[in-house]
Structures are given as C-alpha cells and as structure tokens.
Image (cartoon, rainbow, N blue to C red):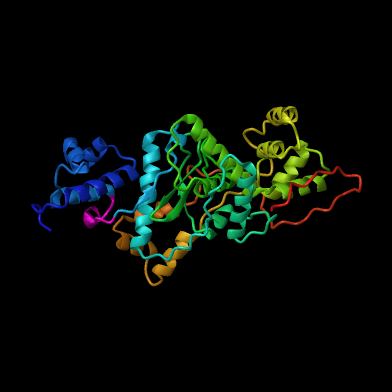
C-alpha cells in the first residue's frame, strides 16, 4: 500500500461511517483524533473524497480496525429496528447500538462462526387480536423446546435456541432496556447487562421481560414498516408486551398457580408467583387484569400497596440477571488452538476491543456487595392447600 493509492470512495465512506457510529463518535471527534480535517471526514463518508493510504491508516487507528477493513465492500443487509419507539433516547446512542450490532454480525460471518438455525416463527395474523398473540407466543415456546406451562429458567438461552444472537448493552436507550433487529438474516437482540450503579442497574425480572419483548418484536413485526406516529409506535410496544407476558407466563399456567395459592390476588400471592416465575409483581398485577381475574379498581389498589411498600424501585425476590453463551462457545470452537480474541480479531479485521465488548456480561461500574437473588427452577405443580381454596376459570383451549 502506498500513501498515494486511492480506494473506492463509496466503500470506504460507508465503512468509516459504520465504525464511527458504532463507537459513538461524531465526525468532529473522529477528525480530531485522526488528524484529518472535519470537512474531509464528511466528504469521505459521503463518498465525495477518496482516502489514500495515509488517511486509511490514520482512520483505522482511531476506529480500532485493520486498514483493509475499510476497503472491504461486504455490507450486511439489515432490517432497522422500529426506531420511533426510541424517540426518547439520544440518536447517538441508538446509532451506536444499531451499527455496533451490524459490525458484530459481519464479524461473525467473517470469522466463519457456525450460527444456530433460526427457528422463530413469523406472525401473519391480526396484531390487534390478543388471543392470536397468545397463540403465537405458545408456538414460540414450543420452537424453543419449552413445555406449554414450563417456567423458563433462562430467557436469554431460550432466545439463543431460537437462533437469536444476544449481545450486551451497556445501558438503556431512553426508557428501553433493549433493541432488536435482523442483520443478514440473523435476529439480533441487545439487552442491558447489570451495573453496580443503582441508577443504571437492570433487575433480573426486567431483563427477562426485555428479552421476551424483543423476541416479540422479531416475531410480530418482521418486515413491518416503521411506525409513522407515536401512537403506532406505542401500539407496537403494547403488542410486544402482550407477547412477552404470554411467552414468560402462559395464561392457563398463571391461573392454575393462582388457584393453587388460594385464588386471591394479594401482594403475598404475587410475591410467591414472582419467586417462581421470575416475573415482576407489578407485571403480574397487569397480567391478571388482562386475564380478567381482577378489575381496574383492584389493580389500582394493588399498585398503591406496591408504592406504599416502596416496591416500585426494588421488589422482593429479585431474580439474577442472565448472560448469553453462544457467541463465546462459537468462538472457542472456531479458534480451538489459539487466542480466541486474537483469532476473531484477525478474521474480522476489527480490534480485540470490539470482541471483548460483545462477550462482556459482567456488571459495569464500581463493585458493591451482591444483592440476594432468587434462582429459578423448572416448573413444579403446587399442591392446593385446602378443598375450599378459591377457584379460577381456565382460559379456553387452543383450537
């Protein structure tokens, strides 16, 4: 490579922009760190200026990649996440997650990792029919190898069995703890990892719900157009929430357990149900409201009790957070006789820092004493304590 050798402007521009956004850098920041004029950075990214060898080396050093990566024309196609839902998140954070995810899948392809077959069934029914959403959630449980009424010990592992690549997210995107998209035919879920900072930490039950919610988006909204209005975005979020609730706690199983615990929806009963299912107490209130077990007045009363006990911030029976295993296992299989990070870095053309971030599920921030957590176990049918225990009707059988 000589300093005067030009490269395809459009290819280099797209690569530079992708990695700049994946690292959360502005054009000005990239210009300052690389010693290239900010106007030239803009021209390069837009394909209006060719980069010679010296420029490529300077850009590659800042973007933590091999210079050859910037001249590689391989671009993965991707289905953008429903971005209007992230309107309350900084665009810089959304872009960073989006383009970092694209870079991860390109690296998986470059490294020749053996991906799992995608088993996600795609929904083609009425998105406004809650019963139909419940049915597709049951189908997805079956595709993940789960019994109809089984407690899911690890939701991230279940998503991986469905063929999803699950990668950590440092912090929430606005009010969201996760994001999902499809890159080169591979479903990708980003979900927050735990933090030692209480303001950034994600409880285990919230992380589980977030993963199930993002699986819902991938199933329900694959190929859907971007929502045009905030109300459309909110409706898509509600649909994904309904899917997540049915996926994590199937309606018949929830009603059966409620009956076994006495049939009355109290905070004590909800706490016991949370300890079993890894599903938040507040979410159970909403779940039983949508199942018709309690009415709006009862739900409001329970929410007030939750607030009075200060459970809005920290509920009892906190499940532990989860982490993905597929990526690390696939890397060890691909590079059994060498340094995994080094092998993946050489194969992808990206620095080791990228690979490390995609593997890192450890809590961020300064260490603190570990909180007591509840370990979820496979489903055990509770025994009705008394013949006089309250009765709850089961949901209609699936056709």
The percent coordinates of residue 93 (x first, y second) are 39, 38
Q: How many marks?
A: 0
Which residue is the extreme one toward the left?
4
| Residue extent of the magenta highlight | 64-74
Note whether residue 144 is visible: no
Give the percent coordinates (x, y) of residue 262.
84, 43
Which is more toward the observer, 332 or 39?
39
At horizontal 62% and vertical 46% (from top left) the residue drawn is 132
* In this picture, residue 144 sits left or right of residue 33: right
Say whether residue 73 is magenta. Answer: yes
**Lateral position of residue 208 relative to residue 385, left or right:** left
Q: Can the viewer see residue 310 in this picture?
A: yes
Q: What residue appears at the point 78 percent right and 36 percent down from the top-left corner?
A: 266
Displayed quadrant of residue 352: bottom left
Q: Nearer the viewer, residue 212 or 312?
A: 212
Looking at the rendered image, the quarter that the N terminus falls into is bottom left
Q: Is residue 313 above or below residue 80?
A: above
The residue lying at 67 percent from left, 31 percent from top is 310
* Location of residue 51 in the rendering, given as x and y in whole percent from the top left corner: 15, 48
Is residue 323 placed above or below 24 in the rendered structure?
A: below
| Foreground of the two, 72 or 82 | 82
**Quick check: is 261 in the magenta stretch?**
no
Residue 112 drawn at (x, y percent): 37, 65
Q: Identify the residue shown where x is 14% and y is 43%.
A: 49
């Amino acid at each position: 490579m000589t300093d005067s050798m030009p490269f395809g402007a459009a290819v280099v521009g797209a690569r530079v922009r992708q990695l700049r956004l994946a690292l959360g850098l502005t054009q000005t920041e990239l210009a300052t760190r690389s010693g290239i004029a900010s106007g030239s950075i803009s021209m390069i990214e837009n394909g209006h200026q060719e980069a010679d060898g010296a420029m490529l080396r300077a850009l590659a050093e800042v973007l933590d990649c091999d210079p050859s990566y910037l001249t590689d024309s391989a671009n993965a196609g991707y289905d953008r996440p429903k971005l209007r839902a992230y309107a309350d998140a900084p665009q810089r954070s959304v872009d960073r997650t989006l383009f970092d995810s694209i870079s991860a899948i390109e690296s998986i392809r470059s490294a020749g990792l053996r991906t799992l077959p995608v088993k996600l069934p795609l929904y083609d029914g009425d998105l406004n029919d809650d019963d139909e959403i419940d049915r597709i959630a049951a189908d997805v449980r079956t595709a993940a190898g789960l019994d109809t009424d089984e407690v899911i010990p690890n939701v991230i592992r279940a998503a991986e069995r469905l063929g999803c690549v699950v990668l950590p997210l440092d912090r929430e995107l606005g009010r969201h703890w996760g994001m999902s998209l499809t890159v080169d035919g591979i479903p990708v879920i980003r979900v927050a990892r735990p933090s030692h900072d209480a303001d950034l930490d994600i409880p285990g039950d919230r992380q589980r719900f977030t993963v199930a919610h993002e699986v819902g988006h991938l199933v329900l909204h694959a190929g859907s157009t971007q929502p045009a209005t905030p109300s459309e975005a909110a409706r898509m979020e509600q649909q994904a929430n309904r899917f997540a609730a049915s996926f994590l706690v199937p309606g018949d199983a929830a009603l059966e357990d409620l009956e076994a615990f006495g049939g009355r929806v109290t905070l004590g009963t909800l706490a016991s149900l949370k300890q079993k299912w890894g599903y938040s107490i507040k979410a159970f209130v909403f779940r039983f409201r949508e199942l018709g077990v309690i009415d709006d007045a009862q739900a409001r009363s329970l929410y007030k009790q939750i607030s009075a006990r200060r459970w809005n911030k920290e509920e009892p029976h906190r499940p532990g957070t989860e982490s993905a295993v597929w990526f690390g296992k696939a890397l060890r299989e691909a590079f059994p006789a060498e340094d995994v990070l080094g092998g993946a870095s050489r194969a992808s053309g990206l620095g080791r820092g990228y690979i490390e971030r995609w593997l890192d599920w450890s809590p961020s921030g300064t260490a603190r004493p570990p909180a007591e957590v509840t370990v979820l176990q496979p489903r055990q049918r509770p025994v009705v304590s008394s013949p006089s225990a309250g009765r709850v009707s089961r949901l209609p059988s699936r056709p």
